[in-house]
Image (cartoon, rainbow, N blue to C red):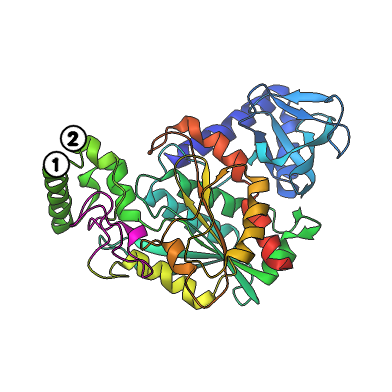
Amino acid sequence: MKYFKNLALVYTLFFILFLSSSDAISTFAAEEIQSPIYYVRFSGQGLNVYADYSMSGDPIAVLPDSTYVQILLGPLDSFVKIRVYGTDLEGYTDMRYLKRLDAVVYDYDIYTYEEMNEDILQLQARYPELLHVNVIGQSADGRNLYDLIIGNPSAPKSMLVHAGIHAREYTNPYLVMEQLEQCLDFYDRGYFHEKSYGELFDNIALHIVPMVNPDGIALSQFGESALQSPELIQTVQACYAYDIATKRTKSSYEAYLTRWKANARGIDLNRNFLTGFGINVKASQPSYAGYSGTVPFSEPETLSLATVTLLYHPSVIISYHSMGEVAYWNTVESRYTAINTEFSNYMLSLVPYKRMGSGSASGSYLDWIYSGDTPVCSITFETGNVDCPFTLAQYPKIWLQHSLVIQAAAEYAYTH
């Protein structure tokens, strides 16, 4: 499916150029080597282009979605200088609305584990010197758990971004994979707050765990047929029987699985960490949500995420969840409220989500990192404003809100 979608875009471009002249095709082939082609997306009424980098005054052009452009300069923070492809029109615009025509990561309707695997292989092939891929474990159903590292793995500092710890929140793995590709694409020419991406990632090793819970995500997307293990399928069926009996759900089995949060063993991974473990649990045995397990770190997924955290001691951590367009930044028991106040203020100045109050520890990843011996700044973004799993309509707003989060967090880690 991915191959044919990309091929359709390329054929469309070549067809347009062929109608203009055969010479244009040769020109395109030569220019593509020098400068990739991007297209406008998510712009609604169109993307404004301005005469100078202040992007003030009246626009000199308004580009509809699917317009092809080349980037001549930048990105510098969120703006780029562009030329509309096949014309002499040049100007400045917002880079968040541009996507590379031959992008690897692009299928955001239902982003699957298999697509993520394919994307990781293609990104590693395209950026062999910049992207380092570590398999940090396997799920109960045999899926790889990844730690993707941009830049210098031995950098003096590190930061961590992770997504997809809850199964039905599977838009977020697509988001962080697209963030990853954007950082790789602009590694040699992008700047944030006057610091080049190369300088940032030479000094801050960026670790991305893109899909913490691949079994649960497959289950939420495709039902029990997505699982290979008969034992795990029986576990999921037992969870449904328990949740029906205890009135935790009234849904049909198929609808129930779409709302699944846990891993394939019925453990809520964000209740399986040490600090506050077993406090305020919502289920007494495996369930679609709310069951912490019998002991902390019992699951390969939580153990893998904890291992990355303990090995690299990230000074900044971004956690992606859904829903509500809110942000969690602290706990009552946190040892790092002071430093995290400044960091969360900064991040919320970029992503205007509602700040949530500090809750008590209940076995979440956030509880655990705030109780450790390594000072850490962290924020948990809850993307989207409707129930999970999201429809396609939610993603454009999420991308526009979060496309610069990694660059901003890396720059913060570098300067603090």
* Magenta-span inclusion, residue 286: yes
Sequence order check, earlier mark of 1 and 2:
1
Residue placed under numbered mark 2 in the picture: 250
> In terms of depth relative to the viewer, which is nearer, 87 or 229?
229
- In the image, taking residue 348 as reference, residue 278 lies left or right, namely left
Q: Would residue 328 be found to the left or right of residue 414 on screen?
A: left
The answer to whether one can see residue 19 in this image is: yes
Q: Residue at x 30, y 41 (%)?
A: 259
Q: Amino acid at mark 1?
A: Ile
In the rendered structure, find residue 244 and report the number of the disc placed on it.
1
Residue 200 image offset from top left, x and y in percent? 71, 64
Eyeballing the image, is 320 above or below 271? above
Q: Which residues are magenta?
A: 264-293
Q: Are marks 1 and 2 in contact (CB under 8 Å)?
A: yes
Identify the residue at image location x=32%, y=64%. Answer: 272
Task: Tell me the tag on residue 77.
Answer: none
Asked whether, in this view, residue 123 is left or right of residue 184, the answer is left
Determine the secondary structure under disc 1. Answer: helix
* Nearer-the-camera pick, 241 or 342: 342
> Element type at marker 2?
loop
The 10 Å Cα crowd at callout 2, few under 14, some 14 to 19, many 20 or more, is few
**Residue 183 shows in this picture:** no
Q: For mark 1, does the 10 Å Cα neighbourhood hold few (<14), some (14 to 19), or many (20 or more) residues?
A: some
Q: The N terminus appears in which quarter of the rendering?
A: top left
- State the image coordinates of residue 216 (x, y, percent, origin top left): 30, 51
| Residue 100 position in % (x across, y down) | 63, 42
Residue 226 position in % (x across, y down): 25, 48
Determine the residue positioned at 67% across, 46% down.
350
Question: Gap between marks 1 and 2, in whole Å?
Answer: 6 Å
